[in-house]
Image (cartoon, helix red, strand yellow):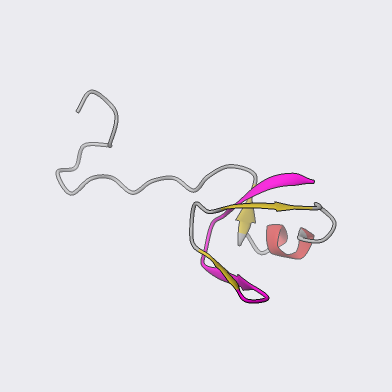
Amino acid sequence: MKTFYAQEPHLDGTKLYNPGDKREADENDVKHLVDLKVLGDKPPAKPKAASGKPEGEGA
């Protein structure tokens, strides 16, 4: 089992994964989602704050 992060919203059966949600899965079972960039091994980048400053960097 490996931890993946949702890059885009998607359904797995009846569970909805939103961007940033963790998902434990066997790499072979989700390879198609990784190839489509729906899942990744790193959390998605956070969008910049409305002020134009990145969150968490000296704000």
Residue 53: % across, % down: 21, 37
Residue 8: % across, % down: 52, 63
- Identify which residue is drawn at 70% across, 57% down: 34
Total marks placed: 0
- The image shows residue 53, relative to residue 27, as above or below, that is above
> In which quarter of the view is residue 16 placed?
bottom right
- The image shows residue 38, relative to residue 20, as above or below, that is below
Q: Residue 24 or 53: which is nearer the viewer?
A: 24
Query: From this viewpoint, which residue is outermost toward the left?
Result: 51
- Identify which residue is drawn at 28% across, 27% down: 57
Query: From this viewpoint, which residue is outermost toward the front?
Result: 14
Q: Which residues are magenta?
A: 1-14
Query: From this viewpoint, which residue is outermost toward the bottom?
Result: 14
Q: Which quadrant is home to the C terminus? A: top left
Check if residue 4 falls in the magenta segment: yes
- Identify which residue is drawn at 28% across, 45% down: 48
Residue 2: % across, % down: 75, 44
Check if residue 10 falls in the magenta segment: yes
Q: Residue 23 or 50: which is nearer the viewer?
A: 23
Query: From this viewpoint, which residue is outermost toward the right?
Result: 28
The answer to whether residue 36 is left or right of residue 10 is right
Residue 18: % across, % down: 49, 62
- Identify which residue is drawn at 70% across, 63% down: 33
- The image shows residue 12, relative to residue 29, as above or below, that is below
